[in-house]
Image (tube, rainbow, N blue to C red):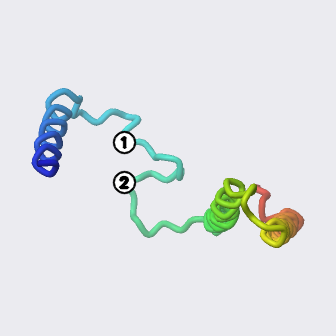
Amino acid sequence: MFITVGIILSVIILGLSYLVANQQADYEKLSAYECGFDPFQDARLNFEVRFYLVAILFIIFDLEVSFLFPWAVTLDKITFMGFWTMIVFLLILTIGFVYEWWKGALEWE
């Protein structure tokens, strides 16, 4: 029953969006989005390694938050050892962040 209702609703919603929405592409839709490259050129364009560096740094510090959230939610239930383990983890990440900052990896010329 749920699968049938889901399929019917999906078909109705997709059909209505196709009928109601404007299908003409405007300038904003065809313009470059966030990366700054024209999307209608060759896909093998050279671009700076800084894009990779920023992406890697974002992933590293985003993982910090993904480890920090469960720890913060269960903070009242963890032991003394669990608390100080996360403090050491945060200290190591802070040292890494300061090192990256010191080396100039966060500078955008």
For the residue labelled by badge 2, is the local secondary structure a helix, a strand or a loop?
Answer: loop
Q: Residue at x 53, y 52 (%)?
A: 35
Whether residue 77 can be seen here: yes
Q: Nearer the viewer, residue 65 or 14?
A: 65
- Label 1 CA crowd tier, 10 Å (few <14, some 14–19, many 20+): few
Residue 107 placement (x, y as % from top left): 79, 57
Residue 103: tell me if it is visible.
no
- The amino acid sitting under disc 2 is Phe
Q: In this rendering, would 70 be left or right of 88?
A: left
Residue tagged 2: 40
Q: Quadrant of residue 56?
A: bottom right
In which quarter of the view is residue 29 placed? Answer: top left
Looking at the image, which is closer to me, 28 or 78?
Answer: 78
Disc number at residue 30?
1
Give the side of residue 80 with respect to residue 14, left or right: right
| Among the two numbered marks 1 and 2 on one chain, the one whose residue lies closer to the N terminus | 1
The residue positioned 78% from the left and 65% from the top of the image is 105
Label 1 residue SS: helix
Tell me the kind of residue under disc 1.
Answer: Leu
Q: Judge left or right: residue 18 versus residue 76.
A: left
12 left or right of 90 in image: left
Q: Quadrant of the C terminus?
A: bottom right
